[in-house]
Image (cartoon, rainbow, N blue to C red):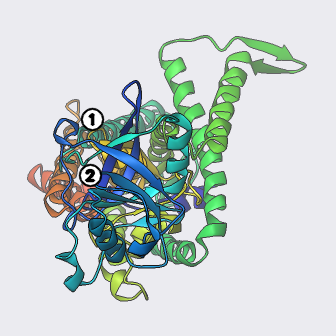
Amino acid sequence: MTTKLWITLAVILLSYRSECHEAVLHVSDWTTYKEYCLVYNASWSNISSSLSDAPRYKLVNLTSTTLCDVGRVKLDLKGTAVCVMRGECAFSQKAQVAQQLGVKVLLIASKEAMGTPSANDSEYDKVTIPLALLRYRDFLDMQKVFTDGMEVQLYAPPSPDFDASVIIMLLIAVFTVAMGGFWSGAAEKAKQSVTSLSAGEERSDSGDLTLYSPLKVLLFVALMCVMLVLMYFFYRYLVYVIIVIFCLASATGLYSCLEALLNAVGCSKLSVSCGEKSCSIRNLLLAAVCIILAVVWGVYRNEDRWIWILQDVLGIAFCLNFMKTITLSNYKICVILLSLLLVYDVFFVFITPFLTPNGESIMVQVALGPGAGGEKGSGDVVVPADPTPSYEKLPVVMRIPRFSAWAENLCEMQFSILGYGDIIIPGLLVAYCHRFDVWTGSSSRIYFVSCAVAYALGLVLTFVVMLLSKMGQPALLYLVPFTLLTSGLLAWKRKEFKQFWAGTTYQKETLNTTAQ
């Protein structure tokens, strides 16, 4: 079970943004309107930034032609917008033919995935009208909705670099890390009077697992590397394994969290006798609810418009239970684990693009899925012809919709994402700090509070760098130094570094001294 939980940490990723090339097609017939996704080249086509400034054009249906030859068109198209089919000739040729016919806007209906339209450098100056790609299925929908003719306006609302979803993501991550660390320390305090930990790996009555061996840390990181590479080459098969593991682990985590919450508020278990054993009706109902929620997520996992809420709830529960269940025995193990995972994160984000055939980051490619295309970091976008996802995505990230990205969300739901690993891995150190506070009897919880604040500051720096560079960042590059240095320097300043480094060994000695 532990190995399965660790596998889900193989994907560590912060949110990624590409330069905006999406626009909105506003279609109306004076009584109703509807908007559709467009993809255009911002350096080629000049499109208004707001609907109020966008000129209105009558739309002419020319989808029976690809508009590669002037001689085939007999209609008067001056001052209109036309929609033609994609293919047979270059975008620039279609645009030049449209210009000769007096067309003001060229829309190209596509049955294929829509990348940003481009042309040879010598062709750019020859095109003077806006050109944009439109899903063919959207054009068919327009014909059904607007039967008496259509007028269209094109506009591309600017997408600000900063989005409120970043703040919400920050709050979720900090809350999860702080609450997970607090829960781990509270559990340690509850069992401190009856449990004396020994150096080594052992399970307590609660099922907690202590990671104590540097060798096992090395093996774990090696397992993560192997798993990530396998996901890169066999994504379409292994993704379903991860989905099943997530459903099981998140249901278990949610049950553990809700049970602890109900116990904390004093909710009765409503036990009934089942022969010689007693059955808790409350726990049975709780288990049923958790299983149902996990199954609902599994069935509707690709419904981007709302399923992200349930995924984040399950994800928070999973991370909390993980930080409470898996404990690091001392600061030495924390340093080894977090340092190795920092190297792992940076290598698979920044170094692997030099090793893969298409210059792709293995981490980014696995996190976004093969259907997301290979355009990350190029300033380009690829919008699927069918908005329904044709590929599975790994469920090991927190997802918050980008509220300000109206045009982008119209084309395909855009999210700010944060990998579970960016929460759990530093969270294990925060949890260790709180347990150390318990061992030393610190009423102020100085180590726990300091490490949690350091995590929040490291995550803020991560988001700032991401916004300034406009590209995803390996969050552990900032979180690991912030949390490790803060906790280590604090222990050194308080002259407790030897005890902090020894961890459970020091705790055992303390308990033995107290007992004597």
- In the picture, the quarter occupied by the N terminus is bottom right
* Side of 101 where 62 appears, left or right: right
Which marked residue is nearer to the observer: mark 1 or mark 2?
A: 2
| Residue kind at label 2, given as amino acid type | Gly
Q: CA distance from mark 1 to mark 2?
A: 80 Å
* Mark 2, other Cα within 10 Å: few <14 / some 14–19 / many ≥20: some
Q: How many marks?
A: 2
As drawn, 166 above or below 137:
above
**Is residue 371 among the parts visible in the rendering?**
yes
**Residue 229, x across and y down, in percent:** 51, 77
- Front residue of 489 and 115: 115
- Front residue of 342 and 94: 94
Q: Which residue is mark 2?
A: 79
The label number, if any, that marks residue 394 in the structure image: none
* Side of 481 where 290 appears, left or right: right
- In the picture, the quarter occupied by the C terminus is top left
The residue that appears at 48% across and 75% down in the rendered structure is 225
Secondary structure, mark 1, is loop
The label number, if any, that marks residue 441 in the structure image: 1
The residue that appears at 21% across and 68% down in the rendered structure is 44
| Residue kind at label 1, given as amino acid type | Gly
**Residue 426, x across and y down, in percent:** 32, 53
**Residue 418, x across and y down, in percent:** 36, 51
Secondary structure, mark 2, is loop
As drawn, 444 above or below 195:
above
Q: Earlier in the sequence, mark 1 or mark 2?
A: 2
**Is residue 513 among the parts visible in the rendering?**
no
- The part of the image, by quadrant, that contains residue 473 is bottom left
- Front residue of 223 and 104: 104
* Mark 1, other Cα within 10 Å: few <14 / some 14–19 / many ≥20: few
